[in-house]
Image (cartoon, rainbow, N blue to C red):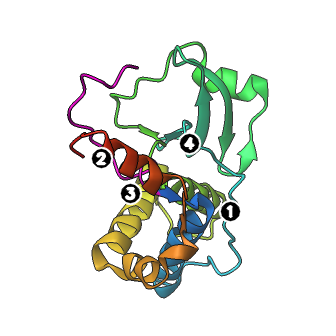
Amino acid sequence: LNLRSVQVVGCDMDYTLVHYDSERWERSAYEHMKRAFQARGWPVNELRFDPELASLGLVIDIERGNLVKANRFGHVRNASHGTIVLSFDTWLSVYGTAPVDLAESRWQFMNTLFSLSEACLYMQLVDLLDLGKLEPGLSYRALYQEVRRVLDATHLEGTLKNEILSDPSHYVILDEELPHALWELKAAGKKL
């Protein structure tokens, strides 16, 4: 890329100017959500954040309480119900060859910060729901909506943000090359 003719350089903050320790962010968000459910009397005391349980790019099927991995064409290639990995025959019988259509409200694509904590807690709560330990009659969709509502409230209340702002070095990975790169762009006459 020849930058000679470029006069202005804009940068997105997340993962461009600021690199996060994602596991710490996610763990903190998870703990905030968990406390909210504990306050409501839900049996979540024994639940623990598992950063290996889900990854970005997966899709939550909130109608069935499943987490699915789809290929680039949208065809399901693996799935779990709650935290239990489904066998090939089971997920094939559920999804067949129909592609995941993210335009449908039943699919929630995991592509943002805090998606891992949201998915981890949701999957664990699906397990509790299946065991009859949550409110009777609660659907997988309603359960997801509760998790989402609690996560959104965590952000709106500002408690998570205040925790992060009180010790940003705990949540942000400093890139020692970044200031140098920005100064070089500025020295080259670029407007930042």
In terms of image quadrants, where is residue 80? top right
From the top left corner, tell me how far across and down residue 26 is, in percent.
55, 63
Q: Earlier in the sequence, mark 3 or mark 1?
A: 1
Nearer to me, 153 or 189:
189
Tag 4: residue type? Leu
Which disc, if any, is residue 131?
1
**Range drawn in magenta:** 1-18
> Gap between marks 3 and 1, in whole Å?
19 Å
Nearer to me, 176 or 68:
176
Q: Which residue is mark 2?
A: 186
> Gap between marks 2 and 3, in whole Å?
46 Å
Identity of the residue drawn at 56% across and 54% down: 116
Tag 3: residue type? Gln
Which disc, if any, is residue 56?
4
Q: Which residue is mark 3?
A: 145
> Gap between marks 1 and 4, in whole Å?
27 Å
From the top left corner, tell me how far across and down residue 99 is, in percent.
50, 17
Label 4: which secondary element: loop
Q: Earlier in the sequence, mark 1 or mark 4?
A: 4
